[in-house]
Structures are given as C-alpha cells and as structure tokens.
Image (cartoon, coloured by chain):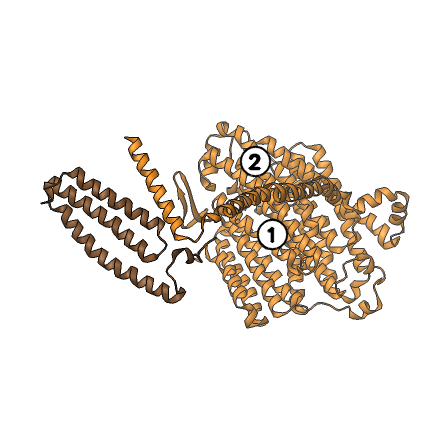
Chain colours: A brown, B orange
Amino acid sequence: MIGAIPLGDVLLASAALFVIGVAGALLRRNAISIFLSIELMMNAANLALVGYGGALGTAEGQVIVFFIIAIAAAEAAVGLAIFIALFRHTETIDVNRINLLKW
Amino acid sequence: MIALWLIPALPLAGFLANGLLGKRLGKSFVTAAGVGAAALATAAAFSRLIPFLRGDGSPVIETIARWIAVGDFEVDLALRLDPLSALMVSFVTFVGFLIHLYSVGYMRHDETAAGYARYFAYLNLFLFAMLVLVLADNFLLMFVGWEGVGLCSYLLVGYYFERRYAADAGKKAFIVNRIGDFGFLLGMFGIFSLFGTLSFSEVFAGAAADPASYAPGLTLVCLLLFVGAAGKSAQVPLYVWLPDAMAGPTPVSALIHAATMVTAGVYMVVRCNVLFRLAPEAMAVVAGIGAFTAIFAAVIAIAQNDIKKVLAYSTVSQLGYMFLACGVGAYVAGMFHVMTHAFFKACLFLGSGSVIHAMGGEQDIRKMGNLRAKLPITFWTFLAATLAIAGIPPLAGFFSKDAILAGVWEAHRPLLYAVGLFTAGLTAFYMFRLVILTFGGAFRGSEEQSRHLHESPASMTIPLVVLALLSVVGGWVGLPAVFGERANRFAAFLAPIFPPLTENEAGGHGLAHQTEWLLMGIAMAAASLGILLAWRWYARGAGRAPQRLAASFPAAYAFLADKFRVDELSDAVIVRPFAALARLLWKVVDVLVIDGILNAGAFLVELTGDLLRFVQTGNVRNYALSFFLGLVALLLFVIGAR
C-alpha cells in the first residue's frame, strides 16, 4: 500500500512532522505539550522507517516501527507518571517555572 | 654441624622477640631473649670455627636461596665461611655476647621496661646485621648488612632521643655514613660492570686469573670501595660522626663504635685484598689516609677531657693504623689489629661505662681521680687494656701494632713508618693521661659523687675481666717470626684468604731477625716515652706542665681542644651552604615556582568553571534548544563533508 506513494513524498511528510515536533518541543511551555511534540518527532521517524521499508520492499521497517510503538507506550506511561509526580510537588507543569537545578 | 644461616638468624629471632613482645613480657624476658640469642649465636659461631682452627677448614658456601635473577644479574642469598669470616664471626659474636651481658647491669637501673626492650632489640638487630655483613658471599648481601649496621648505629646512638644532642648525633652518624655507602654502591656498580657478577669467589677468581686486563678499572673501583670503608670505619674526612656517636649508651659505643661495626671497613678491604693488591695507587691512598687519620685523631685525643671522647678519637686513630696496614699490604697485621683492638677497646669502653656508672653520669675526667680505690676491678682491667693499646709487651696491642709497623717498614715507606711510630708514642701518652686523671691522684668530683662511688655489679665486671684477659693474651696467637717459624699462627690461619697474584709478589721473605728485634725495641721505646711523659706531667706534676704549655699557646691549645674545628669547618663549608640551598629550594623553587604553577592551574580551572556555569540555566527548553542546534550543526557537517 505504502509503496504506492513515492518515497520522496513520504519523507517530506516525515520531515514536516519532525519540524513541527521540534518547534513544539522548543516553544511550548506546558510539559504535556512538549511531551506530545516529542511523540510527534518519534512518529516522524516511524513514518520515515515505514517509507524506506516500502521503497526497499522489505518488512524490517515496519517491524521496527512496531517495536517503537510498544516502547513509546511504555515511555508515555513513565512520562505521564513523572508529570503527575512533578505536579504534586510543584503544582505546575510549566517547564519555565521548574528550573531549580541551575548554576 | 650447625647450619650457617642459624648464626645470624638467632640474633634476628632475639630482635623479633624483644621488639614485638619485650615491652609486654618485662625485663627478665628481655634479658633472657637478648643475651640468650647472643650466647647461642656465639656457641654456633665457635662450633663452626673449630674446623678452621684444626687447619682442615676449606671455604664453605651455603646458599639459602636465589635472591635476584634479572637477565645476567644473578645474586644468591649465600653465606660464606672461610678463615676471615670465621674469625670475624667468632669475635663479633663473642664480644657482642659479653657486651650484651654487660648491658644487663648497665641498663638495668635507669630504663623503663619499654626502653630496656628497645635497647636489647636494637642490640640484637645490630648483631644480626653485622653477622650478615661478615658472612655474606657477595657484595650485595654484604651491602645489606652494611646498611643494617648503619641503621642500628643510628638507632642506638639516638637511643636517648629525647636529648637533642643524641638525636642529632644519630642523624650525623647516619648521614656521614651515607656518603661512604654511596661510594660503596658505586664501587659495587663498577665491580659488576667489570666482572658481570657480585659473588666474591667469582670476582676474586676473575681478577686473579687475568690481572692485567682488570687492573686499570680496579683503581677506581678500589677507591670507591675505600670511600665506603672510610665512611663506616671513620677515616679522614668522614670520621666526624664517630666522636659524636658517643652520645649513645656506653655499651653501644663499645660494641658498635669500637669493637665491631667500625672495623667493617677494614674487613671489607681485607676481603677485597685481591682487588686492592691489583690497584697499587688505591693502596697508596689507603695507606696515606690511614696514617694521616692515625696521627690526626691521636693528636686530638691528647686535649680531650671527656672520657668517651678520648676513647672515640683513640678508636679513630687505631682504625687509621688498620688501614695503614692494609695500604702497605700487611693485611694480616691489619686484621690482627682489628681483633686485638676489639678486645682492648671494648674493655676500655666498658671500663669507662663502669666509671660513668659509678660517677652518676659524669664523663669529664677533670672531675674524677682516685677511682682506683673504689673501683678496683674496673681500674685493673682498664689498666690492662691501656697497657695493651699503648703497646707494652707482651700484651695484645704490642704484637698487632708491632706487626703493622714492621709491615710498613718492610714496604719501604719510611715516612709512614715515622708517622706510625710517633702515633704509637702519642697513643701511649694520651691513654696514660686518661688513666692517671681518672684513676690516680685525688678525687676531684663532688661530695655526693664520692659517696655514690661503687664498683659495678658482676654482670658488668665479668665482661671486663674476660676482655682484659684477652687484651693480655690475645696477641700471642700472632707472634712475630723471631719467635719461631710457626709462631705467627694468626698469619697461617688467614693465609688462604690471600691467593698469590703474581710471581714477584709471592715474596714472604720477611725481615731479618735483627731488624725485627730493633723495630720492636723502637716501638717499645716510643710507647715507654709516651707513658713516661704522661707520668711526669700528670702523676708527678699533677698536670701543671701541660697547663703552663696550654697557657703559653692559648690559640693553639683552643684549636686542639676544639678538635681542629673540623666540625665548624664542615658546618661552614657544607652544612650551611646546603641549608641555604635547601631554604632557596623551599622558599623560591617550591613555594613560588612549583606551588605557583599548581595554584595557577587550579585558578584557571576555577575561573573557567565560574564563567561556564551560567550555561546551566535550569531551563529545560534551553537545553533542548542546544540539543537542536547541535543536531543541526552535526547534520550540516555530515552533509558538508559529502
């Protein structure tokens, strides 16, 4: 299916997704938004992998993506747990206000 | 047959027992372990001496283990027993045992159990090191003993370390010895580079087999070895430590600084006689230094008023005699004097210890007098030893000194002979001055001292008597040839140590009997003159003549009484410039330069850290931004590299 789309287009979409993710991660102040942006970047990578896999006609790309999705689920659980702990402690998840660890 | 290694191992065991347990187990244990170890070592040593006395003793080498094997460099932990080391081991253990015994009485009163244990532990350790020194079969093992006795000397000189001068004297002994040890070490390097081995038998056999090829390098090697010997045996200019070493307990002075350790240098030269005989220039230096030391120290001894200082300078002077003998090739006479000197000088030192003990620590002979009445045994033994050192026949010192002077005469060295003869007269003079001032005349000490005067306990007088007897008869083993072809049993005993090197050296023709009688007569006359002068000046004249003499030449007398100000000279020439250099290195090089570089480095790091820490904003997004920028830079780099 994916093979029907030209690789260049897939990569373009992937790059666009990645850049959006970067912009979100750098610009947003809400920790959950940053987290979502990071997920976006990861999925940009997933998309690129699937695109390459389709272009090369092998299954590896898609297999790796399955693994990444599984790990991302675990990571999301850990990340959200951290945020909850953080919020309980500081009553905020604004990363600009969580800056105790400096010089 | 008792294994050779047991002889040094016994004192080592005594050292360990006293050093580790002595403090807890008390004085009687320390006495038993310390004296017992010395006694057993003596018994073991004599049991091994017997075959040599029978005349069927060939050199025995007992290898304990391979010690070092690095490429071509192989050294065994091996002990060697031949007539020379058998002789040394016997009298070292025997005199050592007597002095251990004496120490029991001497140290009993004034020491705590801990100090007493420490004293005997060191004394045993010394005995161990000395036995290793004389039994060693190679230069390296000998060096171990050599350093060991130096260490023990330091420890025992500084035994009363809470007194500043004793601690300083210990350090002085150690440092001056170090100069000599360095010479020995260099000599050892030289031997290894020449012969490729350090084993005595191989080195000497190699040198004897091909004298011509080794002779050039041997002069330097022998001179370096002699530097070592001069340090250990207190020869000019390295003698300065020995008089100061008298700060130690008196039995220590007797054992280490009169009878045994200081003769190690002579022993080493005699041991290496093969090398020295191939280096005539080095021999000439040995003889010259020896003769100069003999007369120099004897002159100083004349004007000393401390009983132990007189004996110390006398020891330096007598050691000079021994080197004089070695230097003219009369090695047997040198060794003979080593042995007789051990007897009479140990007796003199122990006698002086008995005097000091009775006088409650007083050492100034001007405050003594008439001790003959209160300390008869000490007096008679001291007198016997004095007659021996003065060279009055038939006591031990006469024969050994006569053998040396005859050897010098035989070597056709009239100047050295004259020096030796004059020194013999001086020796008789200052020794009788000492005896007369100490034991004769009227008592000049305080009232309290005079009440306190007493003869020493038996453990102190027995060694005195034994040593005095040996001072009397000890010389009879080496009678000169005029008493018969085989009279000099000592020379015959040591003969295997001196392998013939060249045909013309075989000599051994000896002196004509008339010459020999004449030489004996002259030596006796010199000694008698010295005694007579001392008697006239100090016994009959009650010391007025020398006082007038000193008053007429005050500067000269002060110069002499100050021991020619050699210490002051070395202080000005060596010690103070060295201290100034050390201060320079400390204040400038160390504090400013080295610490400066280090502190500058630390300051730089601190400054960098101070500036860079502002990068750590604590704001996660800043970090993320720098990640991103880094990633972009990396990508640009990778793409650009294409």
- Is residue B521 something one can see in this rendering? no
Q: Disc 1 versus disc 2: distance between alpha carbons?
A: 22 Å
Q: Secondary structure under badge 1? A: loop
Q: Quadrant of the N terminus of chain A?
A: top left
Relative to the observer, which residue lies in front, B114 or B279? B114
**Residue B367 can be seen, yes or no:** yes
Q: Residue at x 61, y 61 (%)?
A: B98
| Image quadrant assignment for residue B181 | top right
Number of numbered callouts drawn:
2
Q: Amino acid at mark 1?
A: Thr
Residue B311 in the image, given as x and y percentages of width and height: 72, 52
The part of the image, by quadrant, that contains residue B579 is top right
In the rendered structure, find residue B222 and report the number of the disc placed on it.
2
- Please tell me which residue is depicted at 27% across the width and 30% down the height of the picture: B642
Crowding near the residue tagged with mark 2, few <14, some 14–19, many ≥20 C-alpha atoms within 10 Å: many
What subunit carries mark 1?
Answer: B
Q: Residues within 10 Å of mark 1 (few under 14, many from 20)?
A: many
Residue A44 picture location, percent across and down: 23, 47
Give the mark toward the camera: 1 or 2: 2
Query: Left of B251 or right of it: where is B502?
Result: left
Closer to us: B557 or B526: B557
Residue A48, image x, y percentages? 19, 44
User: Against B232, is B363 above or below?
Assistant: below
Kindly identify which residue carries mark 1.
Answer: B260
Residue in the foreground of this view, choosing between B623 and B114: B623
